[in-house]
Image (tube, rainbow, N blue to C red):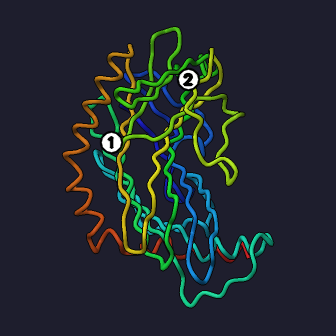
């Protein structure tokens, strides 16, 4: 698999381009439609209950970059969801009353991307650690991908499907090229729909468990619901994304990728707990502060 990512200065993570054996699966898609979204309810005595929906790409000061490491086979991204700045934003928008917090509150997000050469899949681990004093109730992670099967030649004539047995959602076109993905944790909901109809907000938190009928400019999404992430607790999963020149080839590639991902869990957890992984890089300090000041 050949992939190009956007990360770091865009404050988040997305796949900019994705090829399978020279054929485009993702090309010129919107950044916020090629990565993970999150929803949960922040709950605590000082703040009550505040619903949160986060896209994979959010501006500073909502996301603060901690550090990045890029290698030929493994890349790692560490960032924080800045709860304090998020609450300030809601106050400024007059959605909540002013809240006084004694210290800054964060949720840390680790992303470990395994993309070794000559392997027909990409595995990305997502580890969310609640380092705040608040509970994250009704937590969901959504994997959202706007595939452009065969790039600009076929971006608006994709078909879609969902293999329930293997928990794989996919898109394809009449050339027989497929692109799809699956998490190592069982999905609770799925959906394919026209891009213009996709919506996750406080009034619609669950995917529809339906597939778009017929060809179109569509996207695919999977959702994993997880009850609560208490302070100092962690949620972790991994996503495998691949392609194929048939449905069978796609499924075989993803199943192989999921088996391989399970073998890397120990390595990911060791990295997440390391001191170096959690050190704030000086290069991002000024950027985080400057952007925050610009938003005031």
Q: How many marks?
A: 2
Residue at 28 percent across and 45 percent down: it is: 73
The answer to whether one can see residue 97 in this image is yes
Residue at 35 percent across and 38 percent down: it is: 122
The residue that disc 1 covers is: 184
Which quadrant of the figure contains the N terminus? top left
Q: Nearer the viewer, residue 61 or 136?
A: 136
Dot 2, how many residues are within 10 Å of its Cα: few (below 14), some (14-19), or many (20+)?
some
Q: Taking 125 as reference, is 216 left or right? A: right
Residue at 61 percent across and 58 percent down: it is: 58
Which quadrant of the figure contains the C terminus? bottom right
- Dot 2 or dot 1, earlier in sequence: 2
Which mark, residue 123?
Answer: none
Q: Compared with residue 78, is residue 231 higher up or lower down, i.e. above or below?
A: below
Q: Nearer the viewer, residue 101 or 57?
A: 101
Circles 2 and 1, Cβ within 8 Å, touching? The answer is no
Image quadrant of residue 104? bottom right
The answer to whether one can see residue 118 in this image is no
Residue 86, percent from left and from top: 64, 70
The residue that disc 2 covers is: 151
């Amino acid at each position: 698999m050949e992939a190009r990512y956007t990360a770091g200065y865009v404050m988040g993570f997305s796949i900019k381009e994705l090829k399978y054996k020279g054929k485009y699966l993702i090309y010129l898609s919107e950044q916020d439609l090629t990565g993970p979204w999150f929803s949960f309810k922040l709950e605590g005595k000082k703040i009550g209950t505040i619903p949160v929906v986060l896209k994979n790409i959010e501006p500073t000061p909502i996301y603060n970059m901690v550090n990045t490491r890029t290698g030929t086979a493994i890349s790692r991204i560490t960032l924080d969801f800045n709860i304090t700045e998020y609450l300030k934003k809601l106050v400024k928008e007059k959605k909540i009353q002013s809240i006084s917090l004694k210290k800054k509150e964060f949720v840390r997000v680790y992303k470990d991307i395994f993309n070794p050469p000559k392997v027909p899949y990409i595995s990305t681990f997502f580890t969310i650690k609640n380092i705040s004093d608040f509970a994250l109730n009704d937590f969901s992670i959504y994997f959202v991908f706007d595939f452009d099967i065969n790039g600009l030649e076929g971006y608006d004539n994709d078909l879609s499907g969902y293999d329930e047995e293997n928990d794989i959602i996919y898109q394809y076109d009449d050339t027989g090229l497929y692109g799809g993905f699956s998490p190592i944790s069982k999905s609770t909901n799925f959906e394919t729909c026209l891009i213009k109809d996709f919506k996750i907000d406080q009034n619609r938190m669950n995917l529809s468990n339906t597939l778009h009928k017929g060809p179109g400019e569509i996207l695919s999404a999977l959702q994993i619901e997880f009850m609560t992430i208490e302070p100092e607790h962690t949620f972790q999963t991994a996503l495998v994304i691949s392609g194929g020149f048939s449905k069978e080839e796609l499924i075989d590639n993803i199943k192989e990728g999921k088996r391989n991902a399970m073998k890397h869990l120990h390595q990911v957890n060791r990295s997440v707990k390391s001191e170096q992984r959690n050190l704030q890089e000086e290069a991002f300090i000024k950027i985080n502060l400057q952007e925050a000041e610009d938003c005031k």
